[in-house]
Image: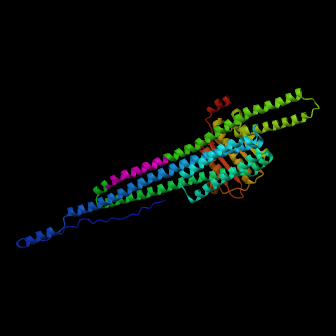
Amino acid sequence: MKKRASSKRFRTRGPERLMERPVAEHDPSKIPSAVEGLSAIPSPSTRLWVGLSILFAFFVLFAAYTIREVRWLEDFQANVVQRNRKASLELLQLQNDAYLLAISIRDMQIGKSRYGLAGWRSEFLRLGEDMDRAAALEGEFAVSTPASKGKRVELHSALEDFRRSADRVFSLAERGEDARARALIQSELEPERSVITETVARLLVLNDQSQAEATETIAEVYGTVKKQLWLVVAVLLGLAFATGLYTFQANRKTFERLHHLAERLQVQSGQLRKLSWKLIEVQEKTLRQVARDLHDEFGQILTAIGVMLTHAREKGLERNSPFVEEVERVKRIVAETLETVRDSSQIFRPAIMDDFGLEQTLEWFVGQFSRQTGIEVHFERDPEDGFFPPEDAIHLYRIVQEALSNVARHAQAREAWVSLRGADGLLTLEVRDRGAGFDVDGKMNRAVGEGMGLMGMQERADHLKGSLDIRSAPGAGTVVSLRVPMPPPAARPTAEKAI
């Protein structure tokens, strides 16, 4: 709720000017009348005290108003900012659970459990209870608005739909109807999980908008109080410099308190940005661990299975045995699964980046992207593009990954270009297409699924102390341009040697 302060003007009259009356020097009878006239004129000190009393009353009223506004700001900040922060943490928990559900659904579809589909029920029950708890807490903490209230209803409905579909899947699996269960996973369970993910993302955006509105409200009240302060100073200076100085000093303390409150708000805003970047770091760490587990553990297991099948075929089966063909088919499935696992691990965290650097990683990725999507990607590079350590290069890679993903999903383009250029101590990374294009400002404001990716790109660019420029218009294609400072030349040989 926005509060508006009404301004009141207090006017005081200064002491009237004394008018001297001539007294007859030789007429004593007129002297008493002159004295009586002087007595009838109000004392200047009396009027001064009246004016000071009015000033004091005005000061008291203004001080009370200012204290009330400051307390309101403090309460508003504690209520909205803290509740939004807690609600955002619960939404992030929901987002993480939805990500784990996506991994579980993928593993169910490829049969990664010796207990079959029914063996996943306990995992789904655990995640479902965790998501229900997080959704309930988020509803308690969040500041309710018409838009967010509707989204929370959608979230609870989506969770209920997902739970019912999961029950049907496991019922089919327990009856041995795995084929129908997997079909139900593809047709209902996965789309409903996507709805949960999108709803959570929208709620995160609405929380950010609520935070922005709270900041605007605080700024508006702060501006109003500041105007009132200067009004008091002007009134006091108009009556008397001394009185005005005193009042100004008293209210300056209030101004400093408001300024301190604004600084605290700025610090908390910085803490939120640090939290956002910490989440990106946790995401990268998780992707690196998942890639390592997929490549090392699952890769070794699948390789061992393939070797064991080969030995079984060579030593335990006759050449014309009917099981030879079955063994070969299983070997092919194992080989295909191994290739899929390795490709997935490279997408999560390309090992080539640690071994050969950014340039070779991008060259490999655009090739993979072209094969998977059918979009021809032209990679242009400058041999003198400079060296970036893996911890920085991964963010450049993620920006290219997100930009090309947007090309595949939205641009409707047949070709794309990725260029890497180094000049004047700056690295310029550009991804462009000639596709459908979009309204950049509109997507950044909506920030649902699509805009969140753009915001993530901006966060990574800020971390690298670079500038991200996205130019697009409907029907005119899109250009994503990133300029970041290259590492100092003295640091490059050491880093390259380490590679």
Q: Which residues are magenta?
A: 247-266
Q: Nearer the viewer, residue 257 or 497?
A: 257
Measured as percent of width and height from the top left, residue 92 is found at 60, 46
In the picture, residue 300 is in which quadrant? top right
Q: Position of residue 292 (x, y in %)?
A: 70, 34
| 237 to the left or right of 135 | left
Q: Nearer the viewer, residue 279 or 488?
A: 279
Q: Would residue 111 be found to the left or right of residue 96 on screen?
A: right
**Residue 253 shown in magenta:** yes
**Magenta stretch: includes residue 335:** no
Report the residue at 34% width, 59% height from top: 61
Outermost residue on the top side: it is 315
Q: Position of residue 298 (x, y in %)?
A: 74, 34
Question: Residue at horizontal 63%, vertical 57%?
Answer: 442
Q: Residue lying furthest front in this view?
A: 175
- Relative to the observer, which residue lies in front, 394 or 314? 314
Question: Eyeballing the image, is 382 above or below 251?
Answer: above
Single out the residue that lies furthest toward the right.
320
Residue 377 at least partly seen: no
Q: What coloring was used for the rendering?
A: rainbow
Question: Is residue 9 something that shows in the picture?
Answer: yes
